[in-house]
Amino acid sequence: MNLDLRHIRRLMKHASRSAFFRKKFAGLKTGKNAEPADFWRKLPLTRLEEFVGEVAESHDPYGSRWCGPGTPLILFQLDYDTAPSLYLPLDRRALQSYAEALRRCWSLLGLQKGDVAAIFDYGTSPLSYLASSAFTPYLKRGAAEGLGCWTVCNDGIASMSQRAVEILKFVRPRLLFVRADCLEPLAVEIETRLRRLSRFTEALVVSDNECLLSRADQQRFERRLGLPIYRLLRVDVAMFLATECPECHLLHSWEDLYGVETVEDDHRDPGNLYLVITNWFARCCPTVRYLSQIRASLAGRGCPRSPGDLRIAA
C-alpha cells in the first residue's frame, strides 16, 4: 500500500469517532519522523471475534462502529454464523462505492452494455443488493446501471435450483453468479434438465463470504458442467469484493477502494499469510486492518486485462 503519515492520521482521526476504534487506538500516536509503513504495522489488527464481542457487550447492533450523523439509511444482516448476529449500516456514499466495487468485478469478468447477469443468491447478499438501483433504495447506480447491463435475481436457497435453471433457459444470461452452497444442487439440476449448459450461459461465478471455492472443486465443477467457473471473494464485514480474472486467474482488487496486505496470524495458523483489509470508503462504518479468514499472498501487477489492479493469489 502507498501510505503517508497524513493519510494514516486522517484515517485514525475519522475511525476514532466510533467507540470501537477509539478503544483500539487509545495511546497510539504518530511521531513526526515515523516511517509510515512501520507505524501502520503498529495499528492493531481487528478480528471478527472483536466485532461479535462488541455487539454482545454494548447491545449496539452496529458493533459501536457507526460514526456517521444520525442513523444509517440501510441496514443489512451479514452472512456470518455468529451469535449475536452482525449487521452492516450503510450511508449513501458507502453504498455507492460498494456498488462501484461490484461494477469493476463485473467489468473484469467481461460483462458489457446490453449483457444480462443472473444472480442465484439471497437478496441481502451484496451481489444482489448492489446489482441494481431497482433492488435497493438510496442506491443511485448499481453495477448493472454502471455497465448498461440487465440483471435477474433468484432467491439463494438450494431448493430454488429448479427455478434458477428455468431462468437460464429463458433469459440466457452471459454470466450466472451462484452462492457457493447452491453450486452442488444447481449442478445436479443442470445435469438432469439441460443437455449442454454452454447453450445458455458462458460461465458461472461462484461467491462466498470469507471463503473461496478450492481449486480442486473449481476444476471438478468445470469438468462436470463443461464451462469456465470463476471465483468471487466477499468479506462482508469489510465491504470487500475481489474477483478472479479470466486472463490471469488471480483475484483483482483496487487500491482506491481498499488497502490490502497479508500478515501471519500466530494465534490461528503460524507460518501462513492471511488477507488483511482496510476499507477507504466506509467512512461512517470504518474497517481498519481487518484480519480475514482467507489465506493469501500478494502478486505483482501487470495483468494484460487490467494492468494497474492489485492482484491476490488465494
Image (cartoon, rainbow, N blue to C red):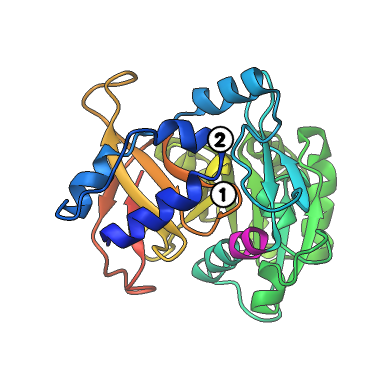
Looking at the picture, tell me which residue is in the foreground, 294 or 154: 294
Which residue is located at x 65 percent, y 34 percent? Answer: 79
Q: Are marks 1 and 2 in contact (CB under 8 Å)?
A: no
Q: Main secondary structure of the magenta part?
A: helix
Q: Residues within 10 Å of mark 1 (few under 14, many from 20)?
A: many
What is the x, y in percent for residue 97?
59, 64
Instruction: Read off the residue under disc 2.
Output: 19
Q: Is residue 293 visible?
A: no
What is the x, y in percent for residue 249?
38, 57
Instruction: Read off the residue under disc 1.
Output: 239
- The magenta span reads 93-99
Which residue is located at x 26 percent, y 48 percent? Answer: 30
Looking at the picture, tell me which residue is in the foreground, 236 or 18: 18
Q: What amino acid type should be assigned to the residue bearing mark 2?
A: Ala
- Cα–Cα gap, marks 1 and 2: 20 Å
Looking at the picture, tell me which residue is in the foreground, 59 or 167: 59
**Relative to 299, does residue 273 appear above or below in the rendering?**
above
Choose the circle earlier in sequence order: 1 or 2.
2
Q: Residues within 10 Å of mark 2 (few under 14, many from 20)?
A: some
Residue 189 lies in the magenta stretch: no
Looking at the picture, tell me which residue is in the foreground, 242 or 200: 242
Using the rendered view, name the quadrant where residue 188 is placed: top right
Q: Quadrant of the C terminus?
A: top left
Query: Looking at the image, how many numbered discs can be counted on the residues?
Result: 2
